Image: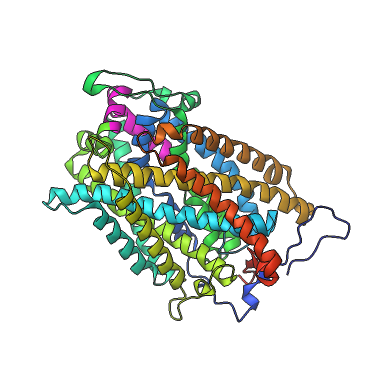
Amino acid sequence: MEGMEPPGHQGMIQIDSVDVSERDDVQKLHGGAVGLAGVLFLTVTGAAPISAMLFNTPLSVGYGNGIGTPAGFAFATVILAIFSVGYVSMARKVTAAGGFYSFISHGLGRELGMASGLAMVVAYSVFEASLCGGFAYFGTLKLAQYGYHPSWVLVALFMVVLISILAYFDVHISARVLGLALISEVVALLIFDLVVFAQGGHNIQAAAINPINAFKNLPASGSGNSAVAAGAWAVGVFFAFWSWVGFEMAPNYGEESRNPKKIVPRAMYVSVIGLGIFYTITSWAALSSYFTTHDAALVAVTDPASFYLAPAKEFGNQFLSDVMSYLIITGSFACGMAFHNTTARYLYSLGREKVLPSALGRTHTRYRSPHIASITQSVIAALIVLAFYFFTTTASGSDAATSQAYVQLYGLAAFMGVVLILFIQALVSVAIWNYFRTHHPGEHRMWNHTIAPIISVVGQLAVLAVAIDKIDFLGAGYTYAWYLVVVDVLVFVGGVGYALYLKSNDRAKYETIGRMVHDGL
């Protein structure tokens, strides 16, 4: 238990943390299973560099801020690095598999903690399914090259099943699989950057990294079959932030890492800053490989699969293009697996605290993995995939894999999840400020615990607001897009309501919400 502040301190939320290291009735994860490299593999692969570039850059260029896409990535880097300042401070104080859920519960109370926990489960569940859509899109294209033409839904469900099998076992296996995928895709993209810039590209523009251009709409251009409609900068910046989703998962592996008080903060900073530089340069290289921004936007809109692969062949060779066409498949798989692992740990946290069925809080007797939570998440992901297959339509002039798997399951489902992530990250920043203000006033630092969280809140809520304002643009032709945001709101409100219900009817469960930590590490 953490000590209470001196009597008379006003506005304080009492913390009654339960240290699971001293409890024999709580099944524990595999402590000390992964080091810094393992945590980086598990989290950076969630951000999925090759998926972020090959999936999100075309959306940003063709529908968002055009030439300002690299500047959009740079802006997101700054905001998320500032967010990480307070987040790292909190991770040093609270080691728990619940991540955001536990941090918000400690900083803002159990009601908002419960709402955040359920919201994160929904967000990461959607992200796994979303990546299954991206995997299916590129997977069906690759299979077609060999004369096979399965429905995209079969390819997506294959990914769900394979992830379920791998995640059932020890976290060591997940870290190794994700590490191999991550190293391969980073090397391929670095080679892409080098061959484009070394040959001068076709149109290297300093305007691409001008911060002002991150907030300018792609202008309409061309006519007839080569026409490109005007974009919305909010869409470009929003997909830039989506490219990082996953880096914040580092604290979720605190209980399974060696010396988490040091490893988790290091993993956070390395992933945020490293990915930021990498994303900015790689998206700039892709834009520079086209003669004009119009040419780049036209390919982004009409043939997104070729946006990187065609320049890779032109400036590199067919082998580089082929390798990247395979790595986007393995990369999206690895990304989906990273989200699966984190969702399982959120379900595990909620289960061991018994606010969800306690079976979710069990670990495998041999592998010490959260196997029941993992299987549960696989079922949820499969149901989401099937829902998009049966209940969405194929846009006129498009094929099912492009319209259903890429644009809707990958694009719109991801939008639903990122809305939750940005809101929860803003809420975490408020929780960090209040936690140090009330429980560790002697350790309060103006930059770390007040200024940085304020900048983080303002930046992320601003992006969230303008993105939601443009949802009609992003979801053009798909009338259900607004309902995805409504579902987000209902999930969060439902979490608050559930916590209030427990407060009145099951006080013991209520007291444990987000409060199980592991101090014996």
Please say whether residue 366 is one of the residues in the magenta stretch.
Answer: no
Q: Residue at image x 44%, y 58%?
A: 42
Answer with left or right where residue 399 lies relative to residue 179.
left
Residue 461: percent from the left, percent from the top? 58, 38
Residue nearest the viewer, comparing 470 with 174: 470
Residue 519: percent from the left, percent from the top? 64, 69
Q: Residue at image x 65%, y 43%?
A: 453
Residue nearest the viewer, comparing 90 with 38: 90
Answer with left or right where residue 150 lies relative to residue 283.
left
Residue 155: percent from the left, percent from the top? 25, 56
The answer to whether 256 is drawn above or below residue 411 in the figure is below
The answer to whether 287 is drawn above or below residue 363 in the figure is above
Give the quadrant of residue 166: bottom left
Can you see residue 95? Answer: yes
Residue 221: percent from the left, percent from the top? 32, 19
Name the residue at the left extreme.
147
Q: Quadrant of the C terminus?
A: bottom right
The magenta stretch is: 279-301
Can you see residue 41? Answer: no
Q: Quadrant of the N terminus?
A: bottom right
Answer with left or right where residue 313 lies relative to residue 231.
left
Q: Residue at image x 55%, y 35%?
A: 465
Give the quadrant of residue 265: bottom right
Count every numbered label the image shows and give the total: 0
Please say whether residue 290 is one of the residues in the magenta stretch.
Answer: yes
Name the residue at the right extreme.
8
Q: Residue at image x 46%, y 45%?
A: 484
Task: Report the magenta stretch's main SS.
Answer: helix
